[in-house]
Image (cartoon, rainbow, N blue to C red):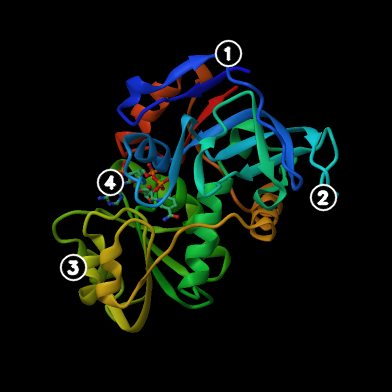
């Protein structure tokens, strides 16, 4: 099958495009998905560089990619959840790196899948799983709800753009950080934008003099260090990018595949209550360029690769 893969850790140049990898074998509780589109996440290039080595075992050659949209074309021994021909989305993350989604086919455990939202293109649908699940599970971790003011660091990225919309649906007020070029975009999602960098705490405090009730750090790089200056007593904190959040009483979250959560996200997207912004689309053979773009760190919404 056609696939992108790498045989050793390294920069984007280690990504090889070819048609000689075998179709993955399908385990008893997995289905074979013919990939239509795969979204890029920062974790794809971080894993390729070897930054996840202490946590996730690579089995080379590694096909990168955890996000997918596609069509079920083969069934495992016991997979009553799906039929051949079903259109699905998935966050196909296993505890090793090997059989990813930047390929013609991926074997996906049913616990990683949900129905594709009707009305979304395959490109939009592929952008939903990892970022959407991270946003949903992060908001749950801080118990965001009606009347809360939630500060979201990194509000215009893949995770942030979904977290803003989901937080608004929960009835929260959202203050979101981004560079000025993304402020109108954030307003459109329902957030009050603030510029990150020097003076951030003062700008947040000016909008929320009593402090915010919850913080989602979706960017790392020390953003959580502003927490004592911007939070109300008892505020809840979560970071997906900075272990230092624990110093401020917060939690580090690693997004989990969860079919119920993914089905909920799919339903919201289908109803138009959750919009997916696709910033750029690359063909599979240009996956290295897609990784380069993601690593620049300024994507609005998501980058997607079509197969
Ligand atoms: N732990 C987990 O389970 C988990 C899950 C998903 C993602 N992550 C990690 O979380 C991070 C975000 O993921 P993502 O997919 O949302 O990334 P992304 O889409 O690549 O994020 C890009 C966005 O970050 C914004 N940004 C850059 N520097 C910023 C800063 N200093 N302050 C505020 N915003 C800034 C950019 O806005 P401007 O262009 O306006 O600067 C851009 O819109 C990554 O480090 C990723 O690896 C972790």
Q: Residue furthest left?
A: 198
> Residue at left 64%, top 53%?
273
In which quarter of the view is residue 90 placed? top right
Give the label, 4 or 2, closer to the camera.
2
Q: Which residue is mark 4?
A: 179
Check the picture and name the quadrant holding the C terminus: top right
- Could you tell me which secondary element the residue under label 2 belongs to? loop
Earlier sequence position, callout 3 versus callout 2: 2
- Could you tell me which secondary element the residue under label 1 belongs to? loop
Q: Residue furthest bottom?
A: 233
Q: Is residue 139 left or right of residue 217?
A: right
Give the label, 1 or 3, closer to the camera.
1
Q: Where does the image place residue 212, in percent across and percent down from the top left?
A: 34, 75
* Up-down relation of residue 5 to residue 243 (above or below): above
Q: CA distance from mark 4 to mark 3?
A: 16 Å
> Residue at left 68%, top 53%?
111
Q: Which mark is residue 19?
A: 1
Q: CA distance from mark 2 to mark 1?
A: 30 Å
> Residue at left 27%, top 78%?
209
Q: CA distance from mark 3 to mark 2?
A: 51 Å
Give the label, 2 or 1, closer to the camera.
1
Earlier sequence position, callout 4 versus callout 2: 2
- Could you tell me which secondary element the residue under label 4 belongs to? loop
Q: Which residue is mark 2?
A: 81
Q: Are marks 4 and 3 in contact (CB under 8 Å)?
A: no
Give the label, 3 or 2, closer to the camera.
2
Q: CA distance from mark 4 to mark 1?
A: 41 Å
Q: Which residue is mark 3?
A: 202
In which quarter of the view is residue 211 placed? bottom left
């Amino acid at each position: 099958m056609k696939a992108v893969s790498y045989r050793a850790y390294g920069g984007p140049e280690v990504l090889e495009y070819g048609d000689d990898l075998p179709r993955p074998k399908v385990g008893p509780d997995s289905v074979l998905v013919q990939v239509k589109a795969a979204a890029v996440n920062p974790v794809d290039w971080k894993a390729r560089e070897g930054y996840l080595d202490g946590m996730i075992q690579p089995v080379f050659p590694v096909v990168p990619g955890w996000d997918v949209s596609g069509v079920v074309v083969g069934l495992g021994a016991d997979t009553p959840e799906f039929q051949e021909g079903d259109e699905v989305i998935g966050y196909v993350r296993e505890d090793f790196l090997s059989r990813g989604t930047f390929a013609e086919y991926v074997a996906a455990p049913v616990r990683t899948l949900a129905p594709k939202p009707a009305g979304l293109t395959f490109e939009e649908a592929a952008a939903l799983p990892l970022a959407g699940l991270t946003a949903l599970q992060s908001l749950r971790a801080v118990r965001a709800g009606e009347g809360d003011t939630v500060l979201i660091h990194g509000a215009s990225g893949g995770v942030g753009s979904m977290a803003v919309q989901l937080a608004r649906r929960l009835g929260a007020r959202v203050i979101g950080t981004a560079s000025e070029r993304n402020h109108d975009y954030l307003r459109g999602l329902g957030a009050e934008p603030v510029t990150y960098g020097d003076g951030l705490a003062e700008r947040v405090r000016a909008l929320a003099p009593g402090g915010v009730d919850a913080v989602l750090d979706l960017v790392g790089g020390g953003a959580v260090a502003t927490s004592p200056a911007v939070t109300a007593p008892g505020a809840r904190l979560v970071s997906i990018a900075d272990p230092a959040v624990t110093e401020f009483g917060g939690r580090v979250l690693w997004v989990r595949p969860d079919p119920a959560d993914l089905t909920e996200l799919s339903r919201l997207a289908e109803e138009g209550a959750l919009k997916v912004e696709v910033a750029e689309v690359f063909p599979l053979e240009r996956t290295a360029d897609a990784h380069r773009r993601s690593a620049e760190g300024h994507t609005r919404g998501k980058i997607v690769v079509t197969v």
